[in-house]
Image (cartoon, helix red, strand yellow):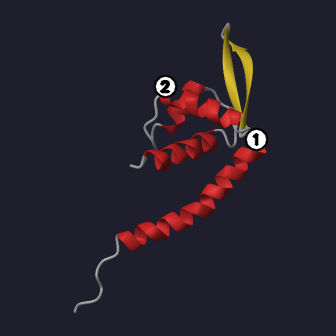
Amino acid sequence: MDIQLKRGLLDVCVLASIMFKDSYGYRIVKDLKPYVEISESTLYPILRRLESAEMITVRTAEHNGRLRKYYHIEPAGLERIESFRSEWKEIISIYNYVNREDDEND
């Protein structure tokens, strides 16, 4: 898969994983596992990039005596998800075109 396409897809997957509830790194990886293979070493640069783009914010809270970072989606992140949904319709259309069968029997 094209690296830029995959990068964009992973960004949207991470945003979707925190769309309804704040979460932390390990939980995000676990939530995404049934849908996409992503490691913590891949996730954390994505989270930093999304934070730099102001699509998410980070807060630190204590959990079982340790500090844990929780990620929260911001309006720009929600806008990115909506943009992806619109773009996906075009991607599906292109996919269907590429996978069409030759209906014309010359």
Secondary element at image label 1: loop
Total tally of numbered discs in the picture: 2
Q: Residue at image x 63%, y 42%?
A: 15
> x and y percent of residue 72 in the render?
72, 34
Q: Which residue is mark 2?
A: 41
Quarter of the image holding residue 67? top right
> x and y percent of residue 23 in the render?
65, 30
**Which residue, as the protein is rendered here, is positioned at the far left?**
106
Query: Looking at numbered disc 1 in the image, what kind of residue is underneath it?
Result: Glu
Q: Residue at image x 48%, y 71%?
A: 93
Q: Residue at image x 59%, y 46%?
A: 12
Q: Is 83 positioned to the left or the right of 99 in the image?
A: right
Q: Which mark is residue 74?
A: 1
Query: Looking at numbered disc 2 in the image, what kind of residue is underneath it?
Result: Ser
**Which residue, as the protein is rendered here, is positioned at the far bottom?**
106
**Which residue, as the protein is rendered here, is positioned at the far top?**
65
Q: Residue at image x 63%, y 29%?
A: 48
In the rendered view, would you say 96 is above or below 80?
A: below
